[in-house]
Amino acid sequence: MSDSTAALPRALTLRCTPELVQGQKVYVRNFSRSVRDEWEKLRGDGDDEKRNLPYSTAITYLKIKTGGYVHLDRGLDFLVSLEKIDDDTLRHVFRCIVGYSKGLSTDHAILLDVPPVADAIASTPEVEFEMARSLKPMQGRQPKCPDWMYVAVPWVVSKKLAEQKFTIYDLVPITKQVPAKETDGSLKLDADGRQVFKNRTMGWKANPNKREVTYLPDSSGGLIAWDHPFGRKYNIRDDGTVVNDATAAQYAMSRFSVVMKTVPNVVDPVIFLDAHVTRVHSNMVFAKSTNIYQGSDGLPILYTELVRSGSVREVNHRALELLARDKMDVSLLQELQARVTQERTVLEKAAANGEFPSFITPDAGIIRPLMPKNDNFAVGTGPGTLHLRLLAEHVTKVLGEKTSWVSFAVEPMIFEPRPTDKQKMSPQERAQRIEAGELLHTIGFPSPEEIAASVNAQGFDHLRIVCLWYRHSTRLRMINALSLAFPDSPSIGDPQSGEEVLLVPGISVVFRKAERFLSHGDDINRVEEFRSFEGDFAGSDSNVMVAAWCETEIPLVKRREGEKRNAYLLRKERYDGKFQVRRLLAKKDFVCQFTKGMKQGAFGNSSTEISPPMPGKDHAAYMALIDLYRSLGVIDQRLARAIAKDKKGKEAGSIVYCGIHVRRQAKTVDDKQTKRIVIATALFPPEEGGVWTMRAWTPLTGSWLPYRQAINAFHASDYALHVDGKAKTDKERWAEAAAHVEDALASLVRDELEPDMSYVVMVDGLACRRMWTGLHNENQSYNEDDITDPRTWLPGHGKGRNAPRKKPSAVIRMNVKPEEVPQYVPVARESESDTEPDSIDFTSAKLHRAEVDFGDPFWVLFNIPRNYQAKGGDLGRTFTRWDADPGRAGDVGERETNQLKTPWYAITATEIYPVGIGKGVDKAMLARTTARLCHQTIAWSDRSRYPAPLHAAKQMDLDHPQYRRSAPPEEQEDDAADA
């Protein structure tokens, strides 16, 4: 094992001390407000692609000109570089950008008189800074670093880490001989009657056979193992599975990210380090960015964003023309553009023949486009946890005495076992139960008794689930899921359409074929279609709670020739049957959940029907049913048991937990501005012997309603428009959203809480940081009265007539953004025993407390994603991607796992930070309870990233008919090249 093992941290969170950047200079221009205003005029009011062109031209030009280490803020707040940039260079490039905005060619743009904005940018003085001077810590205070430091420090750190080769190794088991046993539990004997022993793995240690890999810094502040890709061409196995040429050519690279941030109550900024798998795209025209190798003379790998040209992407040709005109070496960009031109020919030929365009990844060369998210690739996502450990060892080795980590200690607590946890039993018992035909699933359905109790607590006598389907395979999947969820109920059998089947007393199900009602199309009279089976919903019976479980599929709507993107998205939204059905049912006060009946084909292939999987394997159907319970406000007793587990469970079990979800909605597809979306939920403790209940609030209703009822009111209407409010500027709209939260909390205190009840508020700190100044790390060493900012300090701390009469006992700030939370490192197991001195501990699903320099600590809950575990994602704990086996096909029993393609789990983290803590409130208890409310979810098979109330509030927004289609790109699925 490495000599640095003892110094390894629990998390890859490095203190950025002055010693770390000692002697490094940086060159900065800070632009004035008037210059920034002129820049915004230059960028214009076009769509995002057009607004990005002036920026793309400038940054591409400057990166080539200076070697790569340069950053221009998009809003022109500053320009920072590791080399000096000549005034005339800036005057020249921005003069041409002004010319391009007027439609001039490069030859004419360079002849323009220098425009005022170009002269103002060039005349802004370039200041030389010693980076270490901006990192001097102040006792009891957060660091006050200029914004450009958060860009430049990762350049310096990545360059230092690239100075030495990276050491890799795999782990070998620590074994111990133990007696072997038969399936009945008796000792196993050989033919001569002697006892048989077997090797049991007791732990893992480093393999002494080590290798070295070279990482190169990149211009974005990370490192890439450029000369050491992994893929079928590199992870060779002679008898491996034979694949097509396109798959065989696919490869990926290891990449490290280096990001500078701050964390609460630590006097130094911190460097968050993480490992990734960057997959290389087969083509340029559909990639969003590319990496370019500039040579071996110390220049970084150049990261370049590609600009959209019609439906494809290419290098910024304005920057290319200007660089060529200035006699710069643009051979790299010209090679890139030549490849784009060749690929356009492939696209045109495929379109002419009515075929799907096909590309084969070229051999690893100097240009490597980065792949958007795609599951169908020869190399899986995730670097594996061993890679994180190796990164921690490398940092410790390279930086030596300059290495100073933020320390974390495990919070002493035990999580209540969940229904989804694997049952603890001996191998013999497991074998016997499987042989007897018992299904040992870990789905986590709530018990029928607890569902009925929650339904009764909401004022209903009966729950009816209406299953609307149009494919027999989907109907069978629904039946199988319900049979698993209600194992003691009579067999559902083959019910007639509209026949009510009693599952357990108080819960029944009805199946109805409703193909026309569920189908896609904007010409379907769904109101009329619904009337034909309206009786299934028992709309006139106020004692029956009704929910719909519906079949759907992703609509295939092609873009018309000449149709603008927003018009296409709006037409697709109106065509989507799921959108229409959810809206119609919400107006009738019925919640619904959907399950896909068709699986989309990859690479232009047609969709295929989803056949019923093996019992216990149809997780899509199971999760839909569980999420339907969540939409109904069904709270089973797992939350109560989890909270009661705490050593201060009585105190924790008497608090109302309020979750506040806020999201900035940009423009809808019909170009209407919308407000910030504000949703609040509250989880109420029961009276003795009762059950927990949940209510929700939205600005649309202005009052707290049962969660089910609030969902329907929210989904029945469009997102509220900005013009409904008085705010005009972005800052004013955030203040308006904060005022909505104050209204919600004031109503909660006034109308919902008993006088002796206390409440805490849970918010996403990243989404809400513009609303409340008390959430900011830099303000944690101050009190509310120390800050002159007119914004409300924390939610519930308003001071006007409409402010809550009682402040919350605490505000719990959550953060799950990967770039802002620590990454877990497998460390040596803590043990007093000398039998396993080198054993590495893989356990990470614990709550960790940070050791801070002043004030209150923050906590981090590390999570292992369940879906990655289910796919064998834990492979990466004992070896790296370079040693992954591509596997072998064959008959059952002869197949071997394709470790290279398998996704390896990346442990995620949730930051938990209680602030604004009231007198006598135990902050550690709040942190533990928040972790338990993440661990025990309302409607999920495993941990959620957010605690139950905040998760429920966020899910109301995610389920809205307009979400996903009209949400801004930053709110939709991330298509980053790294995973």
Image (cartoon, grey):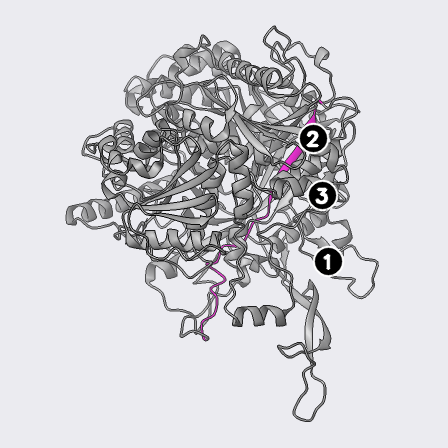
Judged from the image, the secondary structure of the residue bearing numbered disc 1 is loop
Residue 934, relative to residue 883: is it above or below?
above
Where is residue 419 shown, x and y percent of the image?
A: 59, 51
Corner quadrant of residue 179: bottom right
* 182 versus 957 height, above or below: below
Q: Amino acid at mark 2?
A: Ser
**Nearer-the-camera pick, 462 or 102:** 462
Where does the image place residue 78, in percent across and percent down from the top left? 54, 21
The disc label shown at residue 827, or none: none
Magenta segment range? Answer: 894-916
Q: Is residue 446 visible?
A: no
- Which residue is the extreme one toward the bottom? 192
Q: What is the quadrant of the N terminus in the image?
A: bottom right
Q: Quadrant of residue 94?
A: top left
What's the distance in space between the residues labelled 2 and 1, CA to CA? 49 Å
Residue designated by label 2: 654
**Residue at which label 1 appears:** 2
Specify whether residue 882 is painted magenta.
no
Task: Using the image as rendered, state which of residue 884 and residue 690 is in the foreground.
Answer: 690
Image marks 2 and 3: residues in contact by CB distance under 8 Å: no
The answer to whether the residues at label 3 and label 1 have Cβ atoms under 8 Å apart is: no
Q: Label 3 vs label 1: CA separation?
A: 39 Å
Q: Residues within 10 Å of mark 3 (few under 14, many from 20)?
A: some
Query: Please, what is the three-letter code of the amino acid marked with disc 3?
Result: Lys
Horizontal placement of 670 versus 758: left or right?
left
Q: How many marks?
A: 3
User: Residue at label 3?
Assistant: 645
Compute the Cα span from label 2 to label 3.
14 Å
Horizontal arrangement in the rendering, residue 328 relative to residue 921 (left or right): left
